[in-house]
Image (cartoon, rainbow, N blue to C red):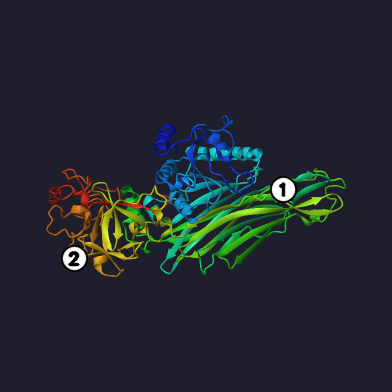
Amino acid sequence: MMLPDKTFLLETIVKHLLLAAAITVVLSTNAVHATEPVAAHHGLLDLAQLQVLLGLENPHPTAGSNPDQSIVWFTDSALADADRRATAVDAYRRGHPVAVLRQDQDAAVDTVLHGIFGLSSSAALTIYVRHPDGSPHLHTVAELPESIGDRQQLARTLIESIDTASKALRGPGPSTAAPSTDGAELVALPVMVFTETQYASTGNGAFVTVRGEIVRDSGRAHDALVVSAKSTHNLKPHDNGKSGPSIVVPGKYEYFLRLFTPDNTGTLPKLSESRPASSPSTDLNISESHTTTTSYGFGLSREVSAGLNKEGPSVGAKAAFSFDFSRSYSTTNALSFTVKDYSIGANAVQTPAQTSRVYWQMPLASAIASKADYFGRSPSEIKMTASMRQVTAEGSAVWFIPGTYTGTMSLSAGGKIDNLGFDGSAIDHKPDPYLQPTASVSIRADSPYLTREVTVFIQSKAGNGGCLRDEHGVVVLRQCPDVAQGNWIEDLHAQWQLDTQGRYFNRGSKKCMRILTSGSAPGGGGEIVMQDCLLNRDQQWEWQTDRIYTQHGEGESEWRMFVGPGDIVGVRTTGKPEYQPIPFNPNHALLKPWSSYPKKPGSADFIPKLGDIGPNDPVSDETKRLGPPLAQERWELIVLRQSLHR
């Protein structure tokens, strides 16, 4: 993916922000997070100048870095400003890394981060990098280091990692997007994918990477959220090797995956499976994988979906939700690592505090751990193996959460090390002086990306293109939600779902659209109101190309949604000759009725079909006499799915 022109982005930043001439972050030297305000709250940096965000002076570009790669950065308080949020969204969706320096751990900050990135991290420094498939990769540091040396080392690690990741995104090669399917089916797939890599604040090279997928698994008799996670832990002690008269090595490595549902009040995450299994061997060679298959509903058969794909991805959201053409989705977690001189034991625990945790312990071989003079009477490092200096281990787990759960989910991965000191005559337990990194990501279970039915904004093609919303029980046309604002995700009254009965369900009011066959809504507000969802035909709708027809059974087959005078939303086209009787395509209602639609049909027009085999039928003479459809009766969908939302 080509990154946007840096000059263009800088102009955008300057337009919204007052850039500081010198960006210096003033950090406390004895606190986990910065305790003093920063001298500036937002800005633009070359990647090679990342040290500035760690409180260091602006150095010359680091050798090997990419000076053309820019990072847009904000403090969490800066993102409270609407213009700065808009700048962050613009930069992130254009492919620029966005760094957030965080002090506050309140829900308001999480809401803003969820709106911009789809998830949030509580780390002191998080750099969000967007993959072309829409999934984020978070590069995080839990706390900012105290010493200048640690900050310098940490900055080098971050620069190298982000530069490598950015080059991979720009370079050629196949996408790592999970599904291999057409755009219409991507619309229906309720999945969120994310990755977090957290680096040790000490800069010693320890890190943990967790890749998570959250998928809604649904059918006629079941509905669940499936959380699949794989973690890679580079566990590296801070006290190691020769230390005074002793040799210090890890006596036990431990690492874990944990799922926490803090808003749940009675339902715990259910662990389905985890890998690797326990093994007493002290020469580990782990190579295994496991696949989780889920299903999701879709309103189009594979043949029809393939034929409609040329109409654009959003066409998949125009069909009523159905399990008649359900699709399957598979997630595979593959593990591969080797460790010498340590065995492995797998454990799982479920606490009453809405937490499910699976962890692995890798104790030092008993033949070594029980022999005080293993490294000699005068201990030396000669017999130390690579695994005694650090290990890279992997784990995976799958959990199920009831589909009714609407709170937050926190997925974490971390580890710890307990050291042993061998002085030739005794063995001492020596806790490692610093913690290993722990990655932790917060995701909302009620995200529109994860809904069973596709969640959309319904936008008119007339004028500036307002969106439908439920306003006090009446369907009205208003400005579309601004997805550049952090709280757009909570604007539920503009979010719609087409359910199995062909009804448009509003996520805010939990009611369905209903047409008025006579009169208007109170206050002259239009001809569509909201009502408890029933099976009546005055609540049922069908898309024909880009028009939305009511299924009301009074023989009014031409009644369809339109924007009337004063931007009211109408449906009764009787007595309005400007709304022509447009034929539906007999090959499929979602196809264009004539090939040049929405232009006026001409003599060369034909009736499009799903496949490309055989000749196309010409349009009728009656159709050729029609004019172009009005913009006021044409609609489009803004689909809220991670892989498609831009």
Residue 63: x and y, percent?
59, 30
Residue 451: x and y, percent?
41, 60
Q: Which mark is residue 517?
A: 2
Residue lying furthest front: 36
Give the mark, 2 or 1, whose residue is nearer the N terminus: 1
Q: Nearer the viewer, mark 2 or mark 1?
A: 2
Query: Considering the numbered disc 2 on the image, is that residue within a helix, a strand or a loop?
Result: loop
- Residue 412, can we see it? yes
The residue where tag 1 is placed is: 387
374 relative position to 466: left or right? right
Q: Callout 1 environment at 10 Å: few (<14), some (14 to 19), or many (20+)?
A: some
Q: Callout 2 environment at 10 Å: few (<14), some (14 to 19), or many (20+)?
A: few
State the residue in front, 285 or 520: 520
In which quadrant is the N terminus drawn? top left
289 relative position to 470: left or right? right
| Amino acid, disc 1 | Ser
Residue 525: x and y, percent?
22, 60
> How far separated are the C-alphas under marks 2 and 1?
76 Å
Total number of numbered discs in the rendering = 2
Whether tag 2 and tag 1 are in contact, CB under 8 A, the answer is no
Query: Considering the numbered disc 1 on the image, is that residue within a helix, a strand or a loop?
Result: helix
538 relative position to 574: left or right? right
406 relative position to 504: left or right? right
Residue 522: x and y, percent?
22, 64
| Amino acid, disc 2 | Thr
- Residue 133, can we see it? no
